[in-house]
Amino acid sequence: MPRLLLLVFLLACPLLAPAADGAASSRRLAITFDDAPRPDGAFLTGQERTRRLIAGLEAAEVRGAMIFATTQRLGDTPGAEARLRAYVAAGHVLANHSHAHGWLRQAQAADYLADARRANKMLSGLGEAPAYFRYPFLDEGRDEAQRDAVREGLAAMGLRNGYVTIDNYDWYLDALAAEARRADPALDLDALRDIYVQTLVDAARFYDDIARDNLGRSPAHVLLLHENDLAALFITDLVNALRSDGWEIIPAIEAYADPIAERTPRTLFNGQGRVAALAHEAGRSARSLVHPLEDEDALRALFVSRGLLAGATPPGDLLLINATLQAGDGQPSRAGMGLRIRGARIVDVAPSAALVRQPGDRVVDLQGRWLLPGLVGVHNHMHLPGAPFLGEPAARLYLAAGVTTLQTAGSADARAELALARAIEDGDVAGPRLLASAPYVTGPGGNGPMDKPGSADEARAFVKHWADLGVHTFKLYRHVQPEIAAAIVQAAHARRRSVSAHLCSLTYAEASRMGVDRIEHGLLSSTDFLAGKASGDCRSPLASIAALDARDPRVDALVRTLVENGTMLTSTLAIIESHFPHRPQGEAQALAYLAPRFRDDYRLRQEQLVAGRANPAYTPALLAKLMAFERRFVAAGGVLLAGPDTGRHVLPGFGDQRNFELLSEAGFALPDVVRIMSGNGARALDLGASKGQLKPGYDADLLVLDGDPAADPSNIRRVRWVFREGRRHEPAELRKGLEGRLGAQHAD
């Protein structure tokens, strides 16, 4: 397969639409190499590696790469000093990676600093004194005292932290490649190149997504590589692929001038690099900050799947082949693709011809069908007005429509949600992974059944109580007062829980500055443009939004505030559409699942719409404005999410599919729609390292469609199968027997 995978990859990249969280052209990175000068490898001698690496960087027009040297090698590696001098002569920069390459946590601070000083002296003899030090293993210490003592000692030596922002396991890729070469000297280098390039480009995207989510921007990144054989063999291919993916390659010194260089993390979680450390400090879980292929078992399985290593493959791997793949990462769809699924995980994603068949594989030919990641809803409900808990019927309907993960956005019965979530995970009920929310929090004048903490202390106690019970998120509702909202946000973040808000008493700008993670309903609930509005005052914003000039500079100012603060926005176009008389309303297939009294309510609402009782502000122009705002937010680098706001006749699963159609109507191309409804949702729920994309190492949550959703978005309804963590479900079986049960008493 000469260069097959790489060719597919490179051909796809120039067609990239701007990713759903900002234009790719704004991304910059520098290339750095650790552990130089390494000894002979499985493919190249040390001297050959240095020559090839210098030539490859020159061919790729890369200037100012940084070479982090381990000076112990100067005494035990032939030609080591000449190799380091050659890097400098080629225009690259030497930096300090210690003398003995030891773990800080296993040393005393004084000994560690003495080792760094020894390396500095030796490197200074080769030219200018190094200005940067990179901690071996990115290990900055076992406790705060040790960390701070070493930081101060390095600064006294004039050494700045040579941090990384894009981590990866290229060192283990090199080890696997050496093992494969020993087993087969005629190893397929094209297949090896493809794995190396794709893994590293995907790691760059992964950590840039984390940066945009948590910093509100893409910093000048620093890519960690090692001075190994794979780097020397494939550096030109890697740089070309990065550029095709929208990255500008810059000198390392320029990258280290980025403001992130001054943001020293206080966390001890530094092993994934600075972007991950800052995100962890802000409350992200450690697991969500590790790329799925920073895992030795996952990488070995990838080598076996591509035929580079023999291995004991468990019988029963599932191969889905010959599908058109939309991976959920913002890239164009690719035809002729295959997935290898082992248990609950995706082992490999590649052109079908590149997947080596193993004994016992179960092969399913999906010619003419489409593969998408499972939908991730972030504004979904397990209740309807008048039915506080929908139970198993709702769970099954969500899953049947392709929703494999959902977060409820405010609960009418949080304990029942938590119990249902446990039942789903135990396998007693079929449904998506369900992340329960606490009861709604509102304020004076708000809905009667909702919680209304009377003080900041009561708000903090509310958070503690529900966090201890296991809820995933908290929802602020329309009348919540500023001091209560601020206390909820502070307490929730301290417990590493997120906060969303359906706003009115607070403006979007106030909530964003307060630290609210997600604002619901696009622009529709924004009171930012109400004249004379006082903080804490809840008045309908509908007329002010309807009258708003799209060119009003206040709109751009609001978007900037949201993006700079990393505030995500949730599109709920399905429920919003239900207010507009000129729009389609209920669909017969969905209405059949409602209990009779809810179907009666639906008919009454439709009669009122026909009779002209809708608010006159709900015009086609207003809906177009709401859709345009969501496009504007994304174009500015904002992270847009989606959920149907289940209610009225917008029902579990059917509402998510309608959102898919409406986002397409709003002007988003298919890669962006899928990223909004899958990848972005997973990131927002702290699951971005395991869900929301079809990539090696991710959970096998996916949809098989019988039609092209790019040609016709309504094909999102033509679900052949839903896979939830590798288990295949038939939509018809999931829906069987549920007619008339949604909202009925004792429906669960």
Image: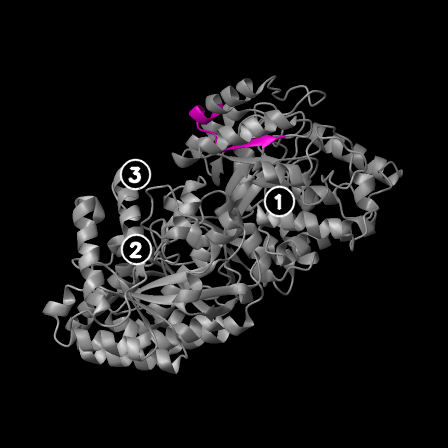
In this rendering, which labeled residue sits more in front, label 2 or label 3?
3
Q: Pick the residue in front: 65 or 262.
A: 262
Vertical placement of 156 versus 252: above or below?
Answer: above
Query: Under tag 3, what secondary structure?
Result: helix
**Residue range corresponding to the magenta coloring:** 466-476
Residue 315 visible, this angle = no
Marks 2,1: beta carbons within 8 A: no
In this rendering, which labeled residue sits more in front, label 2 or label 1?
1
Q: Residues within 10 Å of mark 3 (few under 14, many from 20)?
A: few
Q: Say if the magenta span includes residue 359.
A: no
Q: Earlier in the sequence, mark 1 or mark 3?
A: 3
Indicate the position of residue 238 as horizontal and vertical percent values.
38, 72
Query: Under tag 1, what secondary structure?
Result: strand
Q: CA distance from mark 2 to mark 3?
A: 48 Å
Q: Pick the residue in front: 411 or 43.
A: 43
Left or right position of 313 against 319: left
Identify which amino acid the numbered label 2 is placed on: Gly
Give the residue at mark 1: 570
Q: How many marks?
A: 3
Give the residue at mark 3: 144
Residue 657 visible, this angle = yes
Q: Earlier in the sequence, mark 2 or mark 3?
A: 3
Q: Say if the magenta span includes residue 473.
A: yes
Q: Which mark is residue 316?
A: 2
Question: For residue 30, what is the image quadrant?
Answer: bottom left
Indicate the position of residue 66 as horizontal and vertical percent values.
33, 68
Query: Under tag 2, what secondary structure?
Result: loop
Q: Earlier in the sequence, mark 2 or mark 1?
A: 2
